[in-house]
Amino acid sequence: MAQQCCGDGGGGIAANRAKPSSSAAAAIASGEDRLSAFPDDVLVLILLGLGDIAEAARTSVLSHRWCRVWTLLPELCFHHLVPDDGRRIREVLVAPDAPPPPLRRISVTAQDTGPDSLQAWLPDAARRVSGNLFYRNTAPPRMEDGDGDEAIQLPCFDNATGIELTLGFLGLALPFAGNFTRLTNLGLYRVRLHGPCELGDVVSSSRCPNLKRLCVREARGVDKLSIHSESLLKVDLENLNGLRQLTVVAPVLEELKLYSCFAANKPVAVISTPQLVFLEWKDPYDRHSVQLGNLGQLRRLRTDFFFVHGPHNIWQNLDMLEFLQQFQFIRGLDIILAYPRDISNLPYLMEGMTVVPRTDFLTICFLNEGHAFGPSLFHVLKLCTDIRRLAMVLFKSEGLESACHSGCNCDQPTNWKAEELLLNRLEVVDIGNLEGAEHEVVLVKRLFSWATVLKKMRITFDFSVSKSKAMVLLPILSSFSRPETRVEFYMHHDANEKSVFLLDPEDQGTAF
């Protein structure tokens, strides 16, 4: 089925014609061919308006002439496929007479289809796609060992510019021969890679000379990954279960993200990326086995979790601190401070953080589960007194009540409430997801006291905060500021965390 969701679709082919009437849809439903008399451009509009693959298959058998009409579509979208629909996609892709023209986009969403369904049409798609291929298997993740499963043979896409495959952990075998000459974007999600061809061999410059972005998430079967690319700008690697060795040699790479790839394995990595601007390292780190190379252009660094409470010598904290010690100055530093839900009898670990790189822009994400985070913030700020901008984002597990209970020791040590701290370069503070708890209000007051040259503070309330509650908090929080400081308050539109509006002190919302 082809849908308007693929964009304009008609490519202007029938811009001046009226849309097909409901009688056309009725003819399709009845099985009576009253449509073939229409001009091709009208038939194209009808195909673009169909709702699912069953309708598309039903339409295509009404007349052999319609098989030719399929080739006039510049884009194809297939949704809610079932296992038997693979051959129907192939019928749409293959022209009966002459070679079909290129397709700028194919988008397929399938419901728990197996390798055979995808294999039925993938080679034909490789011959036709000149733009983007999107395939998503909506099956729940397969947690069982599937190494013996039949693998989908990925053909070589000579002309495609983008490929994104979400396979639900179906097996995928990469092609031994051929080049992806025009490919600029490759995304592989929930895949089980089969040998013998290695992922690194395919994505390196010898076979993907124009690849700009590589994203691999929740992939299995990647033991070693060696990337040598003259073109890559962004690499995003997440949950590569079983990775033991990583090599990235990419002279123009600007962004590298690594998250939970080495897991329990000792990290062995060689990173040669002299133009890297952004590095996210949320993985084990060992300075003896990880070579980061020249990072002279690095402007932003994002680290793994640091647990505020927990057992002594927890490896995540030790690795994170060792990683930070490799940097003396970084323009932007992002750290995550995590709290267990139950911190009773767990030691306070912030004293183990004694040095962090000098930075201008500090971002701290608090996974605080409702606990007071004043002590941990105060500790970090004592190490970063030269910051010019501070951003704080507060998170707790969605749908769960606050883990903090009466008598909880999360407010210890209490020196942050009385001890003075001079942040005489801090000009901008941004606080996200504020709920208005007492300890949060006290912390905002302390921030105004510490930041003597503060120009602007922006506070965005958590989406759970009602407007009436926000309007109560607004004058309280505003009262702590100096006259020269501009304070702005924002609220979320319903539960849409990406859409906010500015609160007016006179109780008038302004779109933002």
Image (cartoon, rainbow, N blue to C red):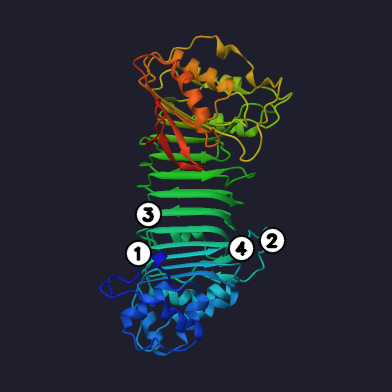
Mark 4 vs mark 1: which is more N-terminal? Answer: 4
Mark 2 against mark 4, which lies toward the viewer? 4
Q: Horizontal and vertical percent for residue 84?
A: 58, 78
Question: Which class describes the residues within 10 Å of circle 4: few (<14), some (14-19), or many (20+)?
Answer: some
> Element at badge 2?
loop
Residue identified by numbered label 2: 145
Q: CA distance from mark 3 to mark 4?
A: 29 Å
Quadrant position of residue 157: bottom left
Foreground mark, 3 or 4? Answer: 4
Q: Secondary structure at mark 4?
A: loop
Q: Amino acid at mark 4?
A: Ala
Alpha carbon separation for disc pair 2 and 1: 35 Å
Q: Earlier in the sequence, mark 2 or mark 4?
A: 4
Tell me where residue 195 appears, x and y as whole percent: 57, 65
Residue drawn at x 56%, y 14% is 416
Question: Three-letter amino acid code at disc 1?
Answer: Arg
Spatial CA distance of label 2 from label 3 is 32 Å
Q: Give the quarter of the image for residue 439.
A: top right
Residue occupied by mark 3: 212
Q: Residues within 10 Å of mark 3 (few under 14, many from 20)?
A: some
Q: Secondary structure at mark 1?
A: loop
Question: Where 160 sits versus 405, above or below?
Answer: below
Q: Position of residue 332 (x, y in %)?
A: 41, 31
Marks 2 and 4, how far apart at CA: 16 Å
- Residue 450, percent from left and from top: 45, 14
Residue that mark 4 sits on: 139
Q: Nearer the viewer, residue 291 or 142?
A: 142
Q: Which residue is mark 1?
A: 182
19 sits to left or right of 125: left
